[in-house]
Image: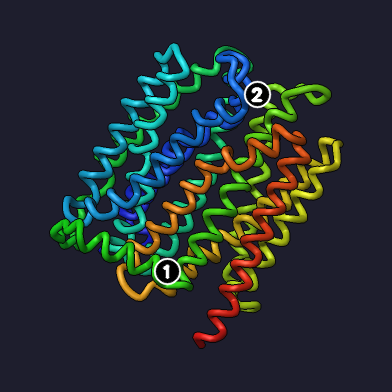
């Protein structure tokens, strides 16, 4: 058992957090570059966004496989294998010359990126003492957020001084470094008990979770919210890259600093959920997302930024509560239940562009706002239904 503040704790936690920064930086770094990719390859916003969402789809769908495989193969070997795959695919992205090749390697990269989210928390839960686990999970989640923001900022800055592809060189170096630190400083599992991989049992667990109303409603809330929230950033990037704003890639990257209010929302989620019940607090988060979306209709840049600050707070408040709700209400196979939530979450992000594109083509950004409000109204109704079902249950 690794105790809090021990040397093994600091080494292993640093290795996992560095890997988290690199994984989520790799996942999100293309988002502020989508207008530039659209111009270079002569693509529509939806086509350009595929280079981003194909990686989120690969990550989401791979989670179910990795969660089961790590139970059979062990945590560290599979984690190292996926990080090595991430490094190789990131290096390959430095050499792509066509949009088709970009999509191919981003899909492979996305599949490799799913290893860490599927394995990290499970490893921590087995190897850390309770005080160490609580602290490490907090650091790890913060590293996820830092990676997403940092990757976008790095990509935007390098695109302004050179070529959009340049960002993959430092990311390759960081990916290789994360492999080294995981290999060197993450101890082999001492409390891990291998389990025989049984595909039929895994499928039965997933089917069982999907038949539980309290879980299925939560999966839909998380997935549909992320479907809109993440892809709003994609379409607003095209708005801000065009007249009258004409923002550079580095300035577009700065827009993702609005995620910092999400960190506050996540930190406050437990207290708010205890005071008002989790479903009601989810409804509060969705209402805030609706409010933030409406604020972006103001054409001044400052109001657009304020709107995204509000939306980020509401989204991460709801997302944190939904994640906890799944863990609390899963009757069996809790790891499988949590993995299934992340599948809905990332697959929702991957298909959001297809939902928003017709509204964008019809009305531009006001159309995206209309589509967002329609979807948020649906998730608000689902959260209300969840609240009513949970009251009936208890």
Residue at point 64%, 36% (across, down):
357
Q: Is residue 109 above or below residue 126?
A: above
Give percent across and percent down for residue 158.
57, 20
Q: As rendered, which of 107 and 26 lies closer to the eye?
A: 107
Q: Is residue 228 above or below residue 203?
A: above
Dot 1 crowding, Cα within 10 Å, few <14, some 14–19, many 20+: some
User: Which quarter of the figure has residue 248?
Assistant: top right
Give percent across and percent down for residue 121.
36, 57
C-alpha separation, residue under disc 1 versus residue under disc 2:
39 Å
Residue at point 27%, 47% (across, down):
186
| Residue 203 appears anywhere in the view | yes
Give percent across and percent down for residue 360.
70, 35
Label at residue 249 = 2
Q: As rendered, which of 116 and 327 lies closer to the eye?
A: 327
Q: Is residue 156 above or below residue 62?
A: above
Q: Element at badge 2?
A: helix
Give percent across and percent down for residue 385.
59, 73
Label at residue 327 = 1
**Upstream in the sequence, badge 1 or badge 2?**
2
């Amino acid at each position: 058992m690794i105790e809090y503040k021990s040397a093994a704790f600091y080494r292993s936690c640093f290795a996992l957090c560095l890997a988290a920064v690199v994984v989520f930086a790799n996942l999100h770094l293309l988002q502020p570059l989508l207008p530039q990719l659209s111009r270079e390859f002569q693509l529509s916003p939806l086509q350009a966004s595929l280079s981003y969402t194909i990686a989120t789809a690969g990550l989401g769908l791979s989670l179910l496989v990795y969660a089961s495989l790590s139970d059979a193969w062990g945590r560290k070997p599979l984690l190292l294998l996926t990080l090595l795959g991430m490094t190789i695919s990131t290096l390959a992205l430095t050499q792509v010359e066509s949009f088709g090749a970009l999509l191919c390697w981003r899909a492979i990269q996305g599949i490799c990126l799913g290893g860490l989210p599927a394995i990290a928390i499970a490893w921590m839960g087995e190897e850390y003492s309770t005080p160490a686990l609580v602290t490490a999970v907090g650091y790890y989640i913060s590293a996820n957020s830092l990676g997403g923001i940092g990757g976008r900022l790095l990509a935007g800055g390098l695109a302004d001084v050179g070529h959009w592809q340049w960002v993959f060189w430092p990311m390759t170096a960081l990916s290789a470094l994360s492999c080294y630190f995981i290999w060197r400083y993450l101890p082999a599992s001492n409390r891990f008990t291998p389990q025989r991989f049984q595909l039929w049992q895994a499928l039965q667990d997933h089917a069982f979770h999907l038949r539980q109303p309290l879980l299925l409603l939560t999966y839909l809330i998380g997935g549909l919210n992320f479907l809109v929230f993440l892809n709003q950033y994609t379409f607003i990037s095209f708005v801000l890259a065009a007249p009258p704003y004409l923002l550079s890639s580095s300035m577009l990257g700065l827009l993702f600093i609005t995620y910092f209010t999400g960190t506050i929302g996540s930190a406050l989620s437990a207290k708010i959920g205890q005071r008002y019940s989790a479903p009601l607090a989810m409804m509060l988060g969705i209402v805030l997302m609706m409010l933030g979306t409406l604020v972006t209709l103001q054409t001044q840049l400052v109001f657009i930024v304020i709107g995204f600050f509000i939306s980020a707070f509401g989204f991460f408040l709801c997302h944190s509560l939904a994640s906890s709700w799944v863990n609390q209400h899963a009757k069996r196979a809790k790891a499988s239940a949590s993995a299934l939530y992340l599948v809905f979450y990332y697959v929702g992000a991957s298909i959001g562009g297809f939902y928003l594109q017709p509204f964008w083509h019809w009305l531009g950004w006001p159309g995206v706002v209309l589509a967002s409000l329609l979807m948020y109204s649906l998730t608000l109704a689902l959260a209300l239904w969840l609240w009513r079902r949970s009251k009936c249950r208890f």
